[in-house]
Amino acid sequence: MIKKDELKRIADAKRLSVENAETDYLLELLLFYIYTEFGDLLILKGGTALYKIYNLNRFSEDLDFTLHKRRFDLTKFLNKTMRSLSLIGVGGKAEVEKYRNEINVRLQFKGPLYDGSKESLCFISLNISLRERVAKELRKEMIFPAYREIPSFDIFVMNETEIMAEKVRAIMTRNKARDVYDLWFLLKRGVRPERSLIDKKLKIYKMKFSFDAFVESVEEKKAFWNTDLRGLVVGELVEFGRVKKDVVSAFSRF
C-alpha cells in the first residue's frame, strides 16, 4: 500500500485533497484488479469514466458499471477483488444490496489515511446495472496510474454519446448537480445528443424526453450547485447560470 507522503505528493500534483487522492488511489486499485481479472465483464461509465478517460475536471468517487455479459458470479467477483487488495495491505469489507435491475455495493477500506478510527475509513460505492446492455460500441482504453505500485492496464469504457444519454436520464430522474456539470462538460467537448438513444434510456422509467421537463429538472440542481460540486472540481467552479444557459441552448435545438 502507498505511503502517506507519496499520497500527499500525488494529491498536490493532481490538485486533489489528500482525502480525495486516497479515494482515487483505491479506485485505481479496484479498476486494476477488476479489469486484469475479469476483462470486459463490466463496462465503466458515469463520472469516473469521464474523469479517468475523457479528462473531466470533476473528481468522481464512485464506480458505475453496466454488466456486459449475462453470466456474473458476484460472490466470486467480490472475493477475488477484496483478496487482491488485502495482499497489498488494504483491508476492507463489502456490504451488498441486490435488486432485480442493479447491484449496489458499499465498500469500506482501511486505506493509507486509516489511523484506527472509524472516521478515517474510506468508503466507495460500486453500482452494477443489470437492466440494459451497452447500446453503442464500447471503447478499450489504457490507464496509466500515477501510483507507482499500480501497472498500466486496459479498461472497457462506455462511449461518450451513450454516457451523455445516461446523464440526461440522470438529470431527469434524480437530484444531483454533478449530472448537469458532466453534461455541460460533454457538450463543451463537442459531443452531440442523440434523441433516439436518450429516449431508449428513459424508456426504462416509462418516460420520453420533454424539453420543458428537462429544463425544469436542470433548474432544480441550482439549490445545491456549490455544495455538491465544491471540492470536487479542479480549478474554479463555473457558475450555475452559465452552465444552465449552455445546456438549455444545446437542447433547445434538439
Image (spheres, helix red, strand yellow):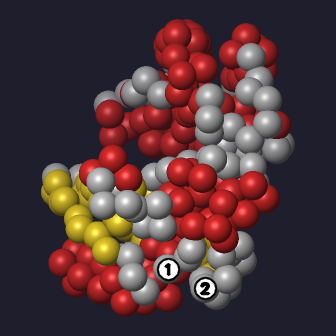
- Tell me the crowding category of disc 2: few under 14, some 14 to 19, or many 20 or more residues within 10 angstroms, Cα based: few
Q: Residue at x 46, y 34 (%)?
A: 170
In this view, 226 is above or below 25: above
Locate residue 67 relative to residue 149 in the image: left or right.
Answer: left
| Residue located beneath label 1 in the image | 1
Is the residue under label 1 in contact with that under label 2 (CB below 8 Å)? yes
Residue 149 got which mark?
A: 2
Does the image show residue 31? no
Mark 1 element type:
loop
Pinpoint residue 100: horizontal percent, then vertical percent.
Answer: 17, 53
Q: Nearer the viewer, residue 43 or 6?
A: 6
State which quarter of the image contains the C terminus.
top right
Q: Quadrant of residue 201?
A: top left
Of labels 2 and 1, earlier in sequence is 1
In the image, which is nearer the foreground, mark 2 or mark 1? 1
Quadrant hosting residue 131 = bottom left
Residue 32, x across and y down, in percent = 52, 80
Residue kind at label 1, given as amino acid type: Met
| Nearest the eye: 50 or 113 | 113
